[in-house]
Image (cartoon, rainbow, N blue to C red):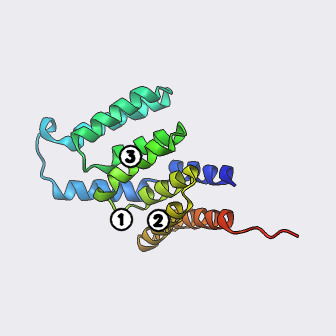
Amino acid sequence: MKRIIFVLAMMFLMGCGGQDQAAITEKKEKTSPMPSMASNPSIQVDKLLQQATSSLQKGDYLAAIKTLDVAIQRDRQDVRPYLLLGETYMRLQRYDKAVDTLIAALPFAPDSGQLNYLLAVNYHFQGAEKEAMQYAENSIKIFGQNKDEENFKKSLVLLQGLKSESAPTKSN
């Protein structure tokens, strides 16, 4: 069952981020004036995210982690580096670090379905089923409110998988 949840998580990671990420970026753009590139942390973070993504594609996880740490230092309220860092730790099966990273982002984007989904998956892999179910339920609610049907369904499947694992089995 853990493999099924892992596959679901990977599908989510590859297909997610569109609406949540776009909404977060759009909100930042609307609320911030157009300062020069040097003083705009969002532009600096964009470049660092590109650099981290390139490192990840090359399989250089350490360089990606260092770059994402710098991106977080540049703009602590930009959730994108936290998400990518959490995903990176998840790929490395460092679920404790993934949870810590994602929890740090939660105050800046409590209504992020992707963030809640990733927390659910990582808590599950840590064996913290109660927390996993809580965040899975949060992601279902958020994706439902955002009318994000595809990710709503993925979150629902995740929650069903979590519940079926925690349900007592009948033996004859």
At which x and y percent is residue 43?
23, 40
Determine which residue is flagged by label 2: 139
Density class for disc 1 (Cα within 10 Å; few <14, some 14-19, many ≥20) is some
Q: Is residue 143 left or right of residue 11?
A: left
Q: Is residue 66 left or right of residue 96?
A: left
Q: Earlier in the sequence, mark 2 or mark 3?
A: 3
At which x and y percent is residue 163?
63, 67
Disc 3 marks a residue whose amino acid type is Thr
Q: Is residue 132 left or right of residue 75?
A: right
Residue at image position (84%, 68%) is 171
The residue closer to the viewer here, 17 or 110, is 110
Determine which residue is flagged by label 1: 111
User: Number of callouts in the render?
Assistant: 3
At which x and y percent is residue 65?
39, 33
Determine which residue is flagged by label 3: 101
Helix, strand or loop at mark 1: loop
Residue at image position (16%, 37%) is 37
Q: Is residue 80 above or below residue 47?
A: below
The residue closer to the viewer here, 28 or 117, is 117
Residue at image position (48%, 58%) is 117
Density class for disc 2 (Cα within 10 Å; few <14, some 14-19, many ≥20) is many
Disc 1 marks a residue whose amino acid type is Asp
Q: CA distance from mark 3 to mark 1?
A: 16 Å
At which x and y percent is residue 95?
50, 45
Q: Quadrant of the N terminus?
A: bottom right
Disc 2 marks a residue whose amino acid type is Ser
Helix, strand or loop at mark 3: helix
Q: Quadrant of residue 28?
A: bottom left
Whether the residues at callouts 3 and 1 have beta carbons within 8 Å, the answer is: no
